[in-house]
């Protein structure tokens, strides 16, 4: 994790964030209230596995933002902090 000064080999190789969402990734969908960069920065600083970030359609055909994780426990950890990360207070213009 970047916070603790550890170098992540996936970051160095540019393989941390994937351009597509593999089917085995655990998805967390939510309405985006801050910049996508704030979400990605938090993931890079606090988690270590591969992830995908993008938009998906929910069951009501509404577009939501989604972050998917290869390590399912990281999806749980992200979900616990989502209210703090995804808030208007973190939206700095």
Image (cartoon, rainbow, N blue to C red):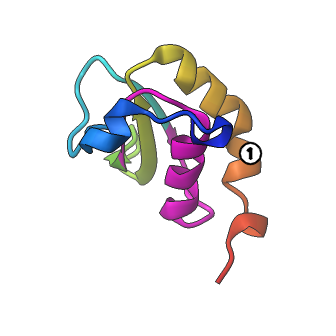
Residue 29 position in % (x across, y down): 49, 39
Residue stretch rendered in magenta on the structure: 29-53
Residue 79, by quadrant, is top right
Quick check: 26 left or right of 13?
Answer: right
- Quadrant including the C terminus: bottom right
Give the crowd class for mark 1: few <14, some 14-19, many >=20 residues within 10 Å: few
Q: Residue at label 1?
A: 83
- Against 80, residue 3 (above or below) is below
SS class, disc 1: helix
- Against 67, residue 91 (above or below) is below
Q: Does 88 lie within the magenta span?
A: no
Residue 75 position in % (x across, y down): 54, 25
What residue sits 22% from the left and 27% below the top?
Answer: 22
Residue 90, by quadrant, is bottom right
What residue sits 61% from the left and 39% below the top?
Answer: 5
Q: Farthest residue to the bottom: give it.
A: 93
Asked whether residue 38 appears in the rendered view, the answer is yes
Residue 1 position in % (x across, y down): 57, 34
């Amino acid at each position: 994790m970047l916070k603790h000064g550890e170098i992540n080999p996936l970051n160095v190789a540019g393989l941390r964030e994937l351009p597509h969402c593999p089917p085995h990734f655990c998805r967390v969908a939510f309405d985006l209230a801050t910049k996508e960069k704030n979400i990605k920065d938090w993931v890079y600083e606090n988690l270590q596995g591969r992830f995908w970030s993008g938009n998906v359609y929910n069951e009501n055909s509404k577009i939501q933002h989604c972050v998917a994780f290869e390590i399912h426990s990281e999806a749980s950890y992200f979900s616990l902090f989502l209210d703090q990360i995804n808030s208007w207070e973190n939206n700095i213009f």
